[in-house]
Amino acid sequence: MQDLDMQADVFERRIKERSNMKNPLSTIPVNIKPRGSIPNTPLAASTISFLLGGAFALGFSLFLQGGFSSPWWATYQLGFFVAAWSAFHWGEFAVTAGWNLEKCSVDSFLLENGATYHVANATALIEYLATLFFASSSKSFTYISAIGVLMVFVGQTLRTTAMMHASTNFSHSVAVRKQDSHRLVTDGVYALCRHPSYAGFFYWALGTQMVLQNPVSFIGFATILWVFFYRRTRVEEKALVQFFGNDYELYRRRVGTWIPFIP
């Protein structure tokens, strides 16, 4: 009987200890409140990762197979688009979790990236499927899709490298208050490009439309993204000048953005 009581006491003590421990899978960021409607829990993060991984596997398999003749929409182009989209969103969370844990939350997937983002992607899919159905010959220029694939890989690599190199200095939202740990990153990929994460996404997004051979969406993406990044860099750089003064001014004069017509 005493042994049973001792085992019960040990069990209760372990339960209390576990309840006081910080969960190593915690998605609660430091000094940042998640703004999305998706529950900010490890269960939500694992579920989203599973779904994105499944979508990536299906899309990339379709791309490697070169598409199928039936159903008519099962093309290598659509497969690559789905794979690239899934990999991007999973990668945003994974890199944040690995190199910037204090800012990591379910919001880091960027799945609630604004209505404009989702409308743009839905429009691109509608354009692709409509033109594929009614004018399939307009999607037959494989060299255009090949250029798009290259742009996606380059853009994704540039953005991911920037996020990893900046580490805790990177944020998905513009910082308006300087943290004690905040430093001006001017080495690595930042020695070549002033806003590599923005440039990476710019060319990644345009690359997806090259793969789909969507002329209307390509122009639309280019216009919307250019306006967005122009405005965002003006706001961000105003804050960076306040944070770092002349050091940032000299850096800005020396290094470009790699986005056309954004000085």
Image: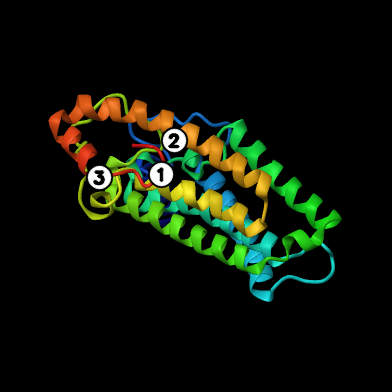
> Percent x, y for residue 201?
47, 47
Eyeballing the image, is 109 above or below 78?
above
Eyeballing the image, is 36 above or below 58?
above
Q: Amino acid at mark 3?
A: Val
CA neighbours of label 2 inside 10 A, class few (<14), some (14 to 19), many (20+) = some
Q: Are marks 1 and 2 in contact (CB under 8 Å)?
A: yes
Which callout, 1 or 2, points at the residue further toward the start of the chain?
A: 2
Q: Determine the CA span between mark 1 and mark 3.
A: 12 Å
Q: Determine the CA span between mark 2 and mark 3.
A: 16 Å
Q: Quadrant of the N terminus?
A: bottom left
**Residue under pointer 3:** 255
Q: Nearer the viewer, residue 109 or 84?
A: 84
Indicate which label's residue lies in the foreground, 1 or 2. 1
Q: Nearer the viewer, residue 109 or 12?
A: 109
Tell which residue pokes out farthest to the bottom in this image.
65
**Residue under pointer 2:** 229
> Percent x, y for residue 175?
32, 29
Could you tell me which residue is drawn at 55 percent across and 55 percent down? 207
**Residue 39 in view, yes or no:** no
